[in-house]
Image (cartoon, rainbow, N blue to C red):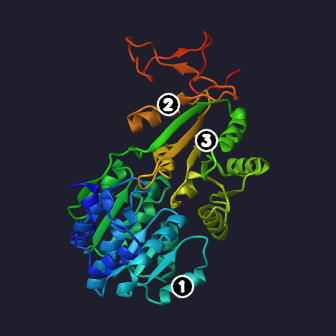
């Protein structure tokens, strides 16, 4: 079956939803949609492994809406890690829900509790929530989960990374045992398998790409430079590319400093991180979407939910602490079959971090050099081919000079 012959017809989608998809000009389902929708529409539990930007929101939104339309006494609950992702999921669900007169409410931190309580008084059938704010409402007794018949845990790995495991466990204990559960995650660590074993009924495992898979059309490059040369290199790269740039900083303070430097270079820039209010984050994201800001500087904790089409370049000003986040970050470009580019800066002492990323991806990131910037090398390299550990980042280390340095020590 060729991609041209695959359509949404034959996936068990209701005619009303097919009409909505046609108006949205969605012609062909993505792989996760093609595999998940028919199974979820039957009411089966689903465990889906899918990277960011693969269309998984519709993969659970369509079956959820249809099953709630068939069961007037049931409610839907979608739990997501971040405010931005909650808003994005709500926007998608509201596109397919109107034909069935299903209404939504979004429960997220940083937003007015009073407005959320008024939204709950309108008896929405679908709740999209972040774990912390959902627990707040449960403790205030402003929400009951006893009617939940369809539960979705979206980006489950990220929620566990952010420390939400206790909240998720509490929610899973509070919702009815007789329900449909859909769990989507970019990776499938042991903790998520444990949740599935204890709280799901014979889930169907769907994997459209192995964990760590990067979009095929993303061109990756790695520059090795000293920390103090990063801003100089950033200026050169922003002058070389002319499209939208999503830049990742490891810390909120770093995001502020980088934004200030980019603004001094003459580029429109906005920040998105946990110190910003919800209104500020929405303004930054909306401005980035429409081109008011050319560069968006983000931290990992705020990056989930940045679903913007046509990002030319993802730039890792700082490498992530977790190798999985590298895959999530660069998945923001090269979406929907388009070509994208991902550039990362590494300092000479970060060979091990790059090794972890390449091990996850099962490939290497090409090292690039800029003619106007001093290019460095990693402090240690593998032993030559033929010796033990002779791959690119094997067990042995040969240093650039005879002076021994600790694994992550500073150069003197």
Q: To which residue does mark 2 refer?
A: 366
Q: Residue 64 at x, y = what percent?
A: 32, 74
Q: Are marks 2 and 3 in contact (CB under 8 Å)?
A: no
Q: Quadrant of residue 65?
A: bottom left
Quick check: can you spot residue 252? yes
* Outermost residue toward the front in this view: 4
Of pointers 2 and 3, the one earlier in the residue sequence: 3
Task: Check the image and report above or below for 355 versus 234.
Answer: above
Q: Quadrant of the C terminus?
A: top right
Mark 1 is surrounded, within 10 Å at the Cα level, by few (under 14), some (14 to 19) or many (20 or more) other residues, namely some
Mark 2 element type:
loop
- Would you name the residue on which mark 3 appears? 318
Tell me where residue 375 sits by quadrant: top right
Q: Secondary structure at mark 1?
A: helix
**Which part of the image, by quadrant, shows the N terminus?**
bottom left
At horizontal 52% and vertical 44% (from top left) the residue drawn is 341
Q: Answer with left or right where residue 105 lies relative to residue 69.
A: right
Q: Which residue is mark 1?
A: 117
Labelled disc at residue 149: none
How much space separates mark 2 and mark 1, taking CA atoms? 51 Å
Where residue 33 appears, as percent x and y from the top left, is: 31, 63
- Who's the residue at 22% across and 65% down the image? 201
Residue at 71 percent of width and 33 percent of height: 229
Classed neighbour count for the residue bearing mark 2: other residues with Cα under 10 Å, few (<14), some (14–19), many (≥20): few
Query: x, y percentage for residue 388?
Result: 38, 14
The one nearer the camera, 16 or 59, is 16
Q: Disc 2 or disc 1, which is closer to the eye?
A: 2
């Amino acid at each position: 079956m060729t991609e041209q012959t695959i359509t949404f017809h034959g996936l068990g989608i209701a005619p009303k939803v097919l009409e909505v998809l046609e108006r949205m000009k969605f012609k062909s389902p993505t792989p996760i949609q093609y595999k998940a929708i028919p199974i979820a529409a039957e009411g089966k539990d689903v465990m889906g492994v899918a990277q960011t930007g693969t269309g998984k929101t519709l993969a659970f939104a369509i079956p959820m809406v249809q099953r709630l339309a068939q069961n007037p006494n049931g409610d839907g609950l979608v739990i997501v890690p971040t405010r931005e992702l909650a808003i994005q999921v709500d926007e998608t669900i509201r596109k397919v829900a109107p034909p069935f007169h299903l209404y939504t409410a979004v429960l997220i931190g940083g937003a007015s509790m009073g407005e959320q309580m008024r939204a709950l008084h309108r008896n929405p059938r679908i709740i999209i929530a972040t774990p912390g704010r959902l627990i707040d409402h449960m403790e205030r007794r402003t929400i009951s989960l006893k009617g939940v018949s369809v539960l979705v845990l979206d980006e489950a790995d990220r929620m566990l990374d952010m420390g939400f495991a206790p909240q998720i466990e509490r929610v899973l204990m509070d919702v009815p045992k007789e329900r449909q559960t859909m769990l989507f995650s970019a990776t499938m660590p042991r903790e998520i398998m444990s949740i599935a074993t204890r709280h799901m009924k014979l889930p169907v495992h769907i994997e459209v790409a192995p964990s760590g898979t990067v979009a095929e059309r993303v061109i990756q490059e790695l520059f090795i430079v000293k920390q103090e040369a990063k801003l100089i290199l950033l200026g050169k790269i922003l002058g070389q590319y002319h499209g939208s740039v999503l830049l990742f900083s490891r810390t909120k303070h770093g995001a502020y400093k980088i934004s200030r430097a980019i603004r001094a270079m003459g580029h429109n820039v906005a920040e998105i991180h946990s110190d910003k209010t919800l209104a500020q984050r929405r303004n930054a994201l909306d401005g980035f979407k429409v081109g008011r800001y050319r560069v968006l500087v983000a931290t990992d904790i705020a990056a989930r939910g940045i679903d913007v089409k046509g990002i030319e370049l993802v730039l890792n000003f700082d490498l992530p602490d977790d190798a999985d986040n590298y895959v999530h970050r660069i998945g923001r470009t090269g979406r929907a079959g388009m070509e994208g580019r991902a550039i990362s800066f590494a300092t000479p002492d970060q060979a091990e971090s790059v090794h972890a990323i390449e091990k996850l991806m099962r490939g290497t990131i090409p090292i690039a050099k800029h003619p106007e910037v001093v290019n460095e090398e990693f402090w240690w390299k593998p032993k030559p081919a033929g010796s033990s550990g002779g791959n690119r980042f094997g067990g042995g280390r040969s240093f650039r000079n005879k002076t021994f340095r600790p694994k992550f020590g500073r150069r003197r």
